[in-house]
Image (cartoon, rainbow, N blue to C red):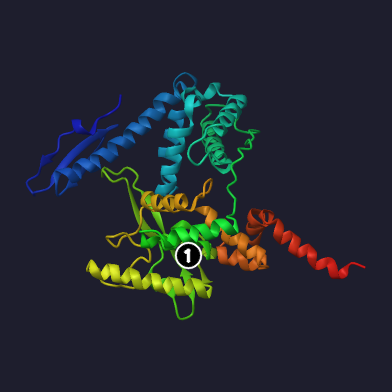
Amino acid sequence: MFRNYKNYKIHLRKDGRYAARVMDQGHNTVFYGRTKKEVQQKLEVFIAELNATAQIKYEMAHPTKYMTLRNWAYLCLNTYCVANIQGNTYAAYERLIRLHFGELGDMPIGRISSLMVQKHITDCSLLVDENGISESHLCRLRNFMHMIFEYAIQNNMILHNPTKGVRIPKTGINENRALSSEEIVRLINAVHNSDHLVTFCIILCLFTGLRKGELLGLKWSNVDFENRTITIEHQLVREYKINSTDEAKTRYVPKTTKTKSSKRTIHMIEPLAKEFEEYKRKLLEQQAERAIPYSEDNYVFPTRNNTGFASKTFYRYYHEILEAAGITDVNFHTLRHTFATMCLESGMDLLTISRTLGHASVKITGDVYLHMSQLHQKMCLDKLNSCYI
């Protein structure tokens, strides 16, 4: 039933090109290339598409008997989703299927009830890894399942979506925790004592609220020391190369920010700007020793080879700093939450905080951060003292 691209003969033409022919439903498709490998890669992609289509037709004939939730999820991912999502989103969906479908993924989709989905989500909430499983992660899992069940309804495979009414349990993992004043001091001291110069980015994030991608995507052309500003124009993202035959399935590339509001200019406080200038001086000295020329297009936080940081390496440095500072139960986004909390507690208005963080609206800022700061509420209410008679 399914084809193997290796079974097709690749021959050398008289004009020096390589070619291969595929017959499908009475139609010939010929692939050409300057090398045999080029034709082989084209064949592999084409045959994979034919096999995916054939598998859909085969399994949809007996969905209750043959089509498991996991198989249907992969089919939806490679048909409905692949043309409309970015590579990193594709990778995130694939990771959900691979890691969080569990025994439910082996069940035929026609036999899955809302009770089963609820039990699965609840069981997932009890799993614990080094960072725990957050409620937002469970929401992503439920939403992805909801999407693929909706596709099943469209194809007359099921009548109802079993994810409707499923509730996300409280996990007790606080994604919005902000660092205390004592923890901030310990974190800064740990950075100053680090052997890795680029860990200064932790301090920069702590006092600017930059997202990880924005931080790692910074170039020297975005930094204006004279006016004490940082301009956010792009971010470093992990791009997943779908249907690639290369061994390296991912690469890190700079891309423009997702929304208009994410493009913004952030002012640096004076102590931060001075330490930033000192960081640049030391970095340029290190790069000069390695014969790396300075350019405005160079990354502010580069690897030894003057490339953008891979997330795995970056997080390794970050966790080393956390361990040195004696801080646990936080992720990198905690630095952004801490910055927002400090802004609130200093009396900054929500509109200014929202624009500094690059939120699409003030409502997002209020919903995410305002409840975090009891001190901010107390400061606001204390202003009513003068009105009391």
Quick one: SS at disc 1?
Answer: helix
Residue placed most toward the observer, 357 or 315: 315
Compared to residue 197, the image places residue 293 above or below, namely below
| Quadrant in which residue 355 is drawn | bottom right
Can residue 256 be seen at all in this image of the molecule?
A: no
Q: Where does the image place residue 80, in percent across and percent down from the top left?
A: 45, 40
Identified at 17% across, 39% down, the residue is: 20
Q: Which residue is mark 1?
A: 204
- The answer to whether one can see residue 152 in this image is yes
Q: Quadrant of the N terminus?
A: top left
| 128 lies above or below 38 | above
Residue type indicated by callout 1: Leu
Question: Which residue lies at the image location 71% right of the left edge and 56% below the top edge?
Answer: 374
Q: Tell which of 181 and 268 is nearer to you.
A: 181
Task: Return the residue found at the far left.
Answer: 14
Q: Position of residue 194 (x, y in %)?
A: 39, 58
From the viewer's perspective, is residue 17 above or below residue 204?
above
Quadrant including the C terminus: bottom right
Quarter occupied by residue 117: top right
Q: Position of residue 378 (x, y in %)?
A: 75, 60
Which of the pair 380/51 is nearer the observer? 380
